[in-house]
């Protein structure tokens, strides 16, 4: 009887083995089984025409994995008649950096394919910056050194939009500190009504970044998130010394304000005309020729 039970148990374990081999836990949450995980080629590239959506950043670079985009890249890239720029993608501006462990959602064409090839035939994965149903994207190298495919997580994957906040402090300003604590060094201050980025919320001390590039920590009680749809940051680099912030996306639209060279703005959507928010909260459009991406 004992021998028969042992054989039966062994048979059950053998049946479960394929399931166990494709199930993986990310954090404390089990992932959904996926039998169609892409495999890299001999050079480590994920170069096949694939429709896989979920990827994890494995790039060990402390600065993060570079995500690139050209201002000439068509917003309607999924159309058969879309006109693409020169696909020297490795030379395009870096618009964001994704750190190891970040889960990315790939962007598929209507046919479902998620990869572009550059001039050298190297594959680049299209990644959503604003959720599964948006067309705001960036490109990352589709190579096993940088990313790996994962099953669809059971939990909701955070999109790559950035949160924008202002302070809520009766003193009219809040200190930015070097570490997570009121006794750590002060590295900067943020005044009332000035916008800044929230980079992470892993404790009571949130990691923040000013538009001028100061990064540090601020207690969450002093932070009021005002929007969650930013995709990046840019610096005004116009040779005229300023750019016009306009009501709409053409030179015939009303000028709201002038933004001086060297100032930074929050990017809501890239393109020939970029929708932006200024440090003091004005929303409008700036021509892309007058700014340069400042990757976070």
Image (cartoon, rainbow, N blue to C red):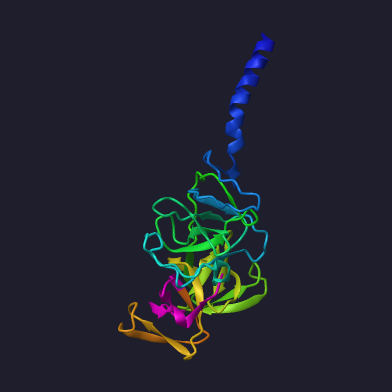
Q: Is residue 270 left or right of residue 149?
A: left
Corner quadrant of residue 6: top right
Asked if residue 157 shows in the view, the reply is yes
Q: Is residue 115 magenta?
A: no
Residue in view at x 67 percent, y 63 percent: 61
Residue 190, horizontal then vertical, whole percent: 53, 78
Asked if residue 226 shows in the view, the reply is no
Q: Is residue 295 magenta?
A: yes
222 or 65: nearer the eye? 65
Q: Up-down: is 134 above or below 187?
A: above
Residue 160, horizontal then vertical, whole percent: 50, 61
Q: Which residues are magenta?
A: 267-296
Name the quarter where the C terminus is drawn: bottom right
Q: Number of callouts in the render?
A: 0
31 or 204: nearer the eye? 31
Q: Is residue 70 left or right of residue 9?
A: left
Name the quarter where the N terminus is drawn: top right
Residue 172, horizontal then vertical, whole percent: 49, 79
Q: Up-down: is 75 above or below 246?
A: above
Residue 294, horizontal then vertical, whole percent: 55, 75
77 or 261: nearer the eye? 77
Corner quadrant of residue 187: bottom right
């Amino acid at each position: 009887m004992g021998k028969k039970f042992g054989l039966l148990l062994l048979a059950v374990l053998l049946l479960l083995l394929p399931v166990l081999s494709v199930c993986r836990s990310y954090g404390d949450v089990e992932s959904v089984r996926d039998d169609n995980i892409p495999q890299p080629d001999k050079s480590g590239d994920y170069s096949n025409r694939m429709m896989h959506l979920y990827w994890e950043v494995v790039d060990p670079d402390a600065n993060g994995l570079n995500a690139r985009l050209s201002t000439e890249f068509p917003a309607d890239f999924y159309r058969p008649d879309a006109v693409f720029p020169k696909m020297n993608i490795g030379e395009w501006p870096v618009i964001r950096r994704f750190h190891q462990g970040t889960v990315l959602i790939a962007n598929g064409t209507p046919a479902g394919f998620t990869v572009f090839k550059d001039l050298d035939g190297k594959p680049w994965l299209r990644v959503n910056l604003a959720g599964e149903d948006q067309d705001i994207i960036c490109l990352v190298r589709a190579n096993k050194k940088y990313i790996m495919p994962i099953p669809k997580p059971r939990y909701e994957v955070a999109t790559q939009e950035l949160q924008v906040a202002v302070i809520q402090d009766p003193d009219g300003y809040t200190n930015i500190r070097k570490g997570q604590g009121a006794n750590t060094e002060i590295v900067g201050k943020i005044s009332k009504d000035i916008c800044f980025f929230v980079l992470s919320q892993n404790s009571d001390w949130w990691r923040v970044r000013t538009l001028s590039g100061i990064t540090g920590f601020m207690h969450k009680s002093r932070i009021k998130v005002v929007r969650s749809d930013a995709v990046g940051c840019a610096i005004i680099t116009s040779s005229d010394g300023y750019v016009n912030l306009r009501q709409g996306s053409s030179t015939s639209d009303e000028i709201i304000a002038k933004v001086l060279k060297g100032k930074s703005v929050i990017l809501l959507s890239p393109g020939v005309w970029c929708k932006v928010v200024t440090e003091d909260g004005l929303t409008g459009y700036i021509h892309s020729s007058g700014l340069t991406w400042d990757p976070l």
